[in-house]
């Protein structure tokens, strides 16, 4: 039992622990926290700058950020601390006085910045491109899209990694003692080590270890909890349970009145009980007109649109059909300047859209995407209200009132407090439509909005779009739904290889195609 007693004296000598405890808390713990917090805050600022430089289009920003990251990640922490702490000791003395403490914080921050920069960069780059596209389509500037949509999502995704970095800083703070700290500046490790030398056992050092764990373990669990809350949002549990069934029932309700109606051509609107109920007084829209002339567009050397001419009258529905890669989506994106054409002009209510700032144009021309592109960190209501608040600068109450009304119009009054991940695909797409409508546009662009939906959810969305078309909204719809185009469109445009091959009334195009290309296309899709 002798060796057991030996171990106890080495590690669990209560007296020497009790003796060092006040100093451990008042000096060691305090300094460790100051060193770790200060270097994390400064490192976060450096990291954010590095991340923005790292994703910049300019190589003059990217390359220095890369070199910095490689150097400070590649060097052992102790080397950096000694190089900074001793190499800059003179400057440090002039700036901060005799203490090496500030230089220690600086060295820790420079190291942390390199890691945090990489964490931020990968977080921001992991956010889907569609999020920025949706932000821009809602009239946000690039900066607003980054600040309000992309960066918050990126940061949330990397929150656990950032906490790991803080924990790394807590531990790395022990290296600063190499710089020769004053007694009042010693951190946990140094206080423990000093006491261990005096008492001749390791108990004070073990106590220091326990303090490290007291800082890091609860923090990890707390951040995991915050991460969970941010990911899932505050939601009553009762709503989550049985969600699938509710959403399926709702979709079924939407579909039931129209099942097969589109296919048979016997579609009466609004046939859906939930849609009809949700908008007893139909909303009327003041649709705008579009005139596209000689429009061409290229992605680099790839010419995608060749001299497109198109007239879209106010309050009409134009469906664009054509084979994959024929330039339909590109034409749509030219209409709200998500891409810039190389030639030609587009008039909105008689004015060239190139006279406006793109952000102003996009308030008048809304867009809905195939992949919905809802903001996952916001509820349905938050998704619709975000641009109203941040772009249109409406007071919060007014924005939420309008958002709630728009969601009610698309049959989602009862689901407005749900996040996208708790909505079915059809419901998400209806939120996206409500979100675009809330900006009060004159023209709505729909880019294959039902292509990502399960077949049983398609009809609900198509029915909503058909109702919107009947309410006076000008709509340009890229679609593979030929029955929808036939029944709802005022004009169908067939594109192939970047050209409008035929355009006209749906009956004329579908029943009496003129060109061999349209005949071949229809024979493949009908
Ligand atoms: N961002 C881009 N960069 C480079 N080329 C692109 C880009 N987007 C589309 N293209 C190319 O432009 C052409 C037209 O694409 P577009 O998406 O407009 O066609 P589409 O008719 O909408 O096709 P689909 O029905 O498959 O969506 C294609 O050859 C496509 O590969």
Image (cartoon, rainbow, N blue to C red):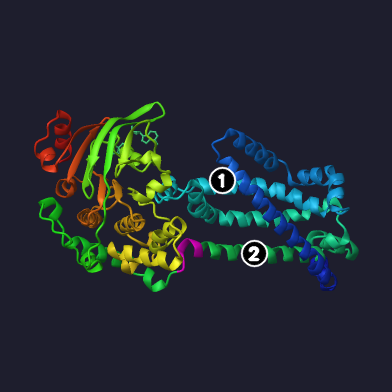
Asked if one can make out residue 498 in the rendered structure from this viewpoint, the answer is: no
| Label 1 with label 2: CB-CB less than 8 Å | no
Quadrant of the rendered image containing residue 267: bottom left
Residue drawn at the location 39% of the way across and 64% of the way down? 381
Q: Secondary structure at mark 2?
A: helix
Quadrant of the rendered image containing residue 416: bottom left
Residue 27 drawn in magenta: no
Q: Secondary structure at mark 1?
A: helix
Query: Which one is nearer the viewer's eye here, 146 or 461?
Result: 146
Residue drawn at the location 61% of the way across and 48% of the way down? 48
Chain part drawn in magenta: 229-234
Say which residue label 1 marks: 121
Say which residue label 2 marks: 217
Quadrant of the rendered image containing residue 76: top right
Residue 232 drawn in magenta: yes
Residue most toward the right?
198
Given this view, does label 1 or label 2 mark the residue nearer the observer?
1
Q: Position of residue 208 (x, y in %)?
A: 77, 64
Query: Which one is nearer the viewer's eye here, 72 or 317?
Result: 317
How many residues crowd around disc 2 within 10 Å: few (fewer than 14), some, or many (20 or more)? Answer: few
Q: Position of residue 372 (x, y in %)?
A: 35, 52
Relative to 474, is 184 above or below? below
How many residues crowd around disc 1 within 10 Å: few (fewer than 14), some, or many (20 or more)? Answer: many
Query: Which one is nearer the viewer's eye here, 411 or 36?
Result: 411
Q: Earlier in the sequence, mark 1 or mark 2?
A: 1
Quadrant of the frame with the N terminus: bottom right
- Drawn side of residue 9 relative to residue 423, left or right: right
Relative to 123, is 523 above or below? above
């Amino acid at each position: 039992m002798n060796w057991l007693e030996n171990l106890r004296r080495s590690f669990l000598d209560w007296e020497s622990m009790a003796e060092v405890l006040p100093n451990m808390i008042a000096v060691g713990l305090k300094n460790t926290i100051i060193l770790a917090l200060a270097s994390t805050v400064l490192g976060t600022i450096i990291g954010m700058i590095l991340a923005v430089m790292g994703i910049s289009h300019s190589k003059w920003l990217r390359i220095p950020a890369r070199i910095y990251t490689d150097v400070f990640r590649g060097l052992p922490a102790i080397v950096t601390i000694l190089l900074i702490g001793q190499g800059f000791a003179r400057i440090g003395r002039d700036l901060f006085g005799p203490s090496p403490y500030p230089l220690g914080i600086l060295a820790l921050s420079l190291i942390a910045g390199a890691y945090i920069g990489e964490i931020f960069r990968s977080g921001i780059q992991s956010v889907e491109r569609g999020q920025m596209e949706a932000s821009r389509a809602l009239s946000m500037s690039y900066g607003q899209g980054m600040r309000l949509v992309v960066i918050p999502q990126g940061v949330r995704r990397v929150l656990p990694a950032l906490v790991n970095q803080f924990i790394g800083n807590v531990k790395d703070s022990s290296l600063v003692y190499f710089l020769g700290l004053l007694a009042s500046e010693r951190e946990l490790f140094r206080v423990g080590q000093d006491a261990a030398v005096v008492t001749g056992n390791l108990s004070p050092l073990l106590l220091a270890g326990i303090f490290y764990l007291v800082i890091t373990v609860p923090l990890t669990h707390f951040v995991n909890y915050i991460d969970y809350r941010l990911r899932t949002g505050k939601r009553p549990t009762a709503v989550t349970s049985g969600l699938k069934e509710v959403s399926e029932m709702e979709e079924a309700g939407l579909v039931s009145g129209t099942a097969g109606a589109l296919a048979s051509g016997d579609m009466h609107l609004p046939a859906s009980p939930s849609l009809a109920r949700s908008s007893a007084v139909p909303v009327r829209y003041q649709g705008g007109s579009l005139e596209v002339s000689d429009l061409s567009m290229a992605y680099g050397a790839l010419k995608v649109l060749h001299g497109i001419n198109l007239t879209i009258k106010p309050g009409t529905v134009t469906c664009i059909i054509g084979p994959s890669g024929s330039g339909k989506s590109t034409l749509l994106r030219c209409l709200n300047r998500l891409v810039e054409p190389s030639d030609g002009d587009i008039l909105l209510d008689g004015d060239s859209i190139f006279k406006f700032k793109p952000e102003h144009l996009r308030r008048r021309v809304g867009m809905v995407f195939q992949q919905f592109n809802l903001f996952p960190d916001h509820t349905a209501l938050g998704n619709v209200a975000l641009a109203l608040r941040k772009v249109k600068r409406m007071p919060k109450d007014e924005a939420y009132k309008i958002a709630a009304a728009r969601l009610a119009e698309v049959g989602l009054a009862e689901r407005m407090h749900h996040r996208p991940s708790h909505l079915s695909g059809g419901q998400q797409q209806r939120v996206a439509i409500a979100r675009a409508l809330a900006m009060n546009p004159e023209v709505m662009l729909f880019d294959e909005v039902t292509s990502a939906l399960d077949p049983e959810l398609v009809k609900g969305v198509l029915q909503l779009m058909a109702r919107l078309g009947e309410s006076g909204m000008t709509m340009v719809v890229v679609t593979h739904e030929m029955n929808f185009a036939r029944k709802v469109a005022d004009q169908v445009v067939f594109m192939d290889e970047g050209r409008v091959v035929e355009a006209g009334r749906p009956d004329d195009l579908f029943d009496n195609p003129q060109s061999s290309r349209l005949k071949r296309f229809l024979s493949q899709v009908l």
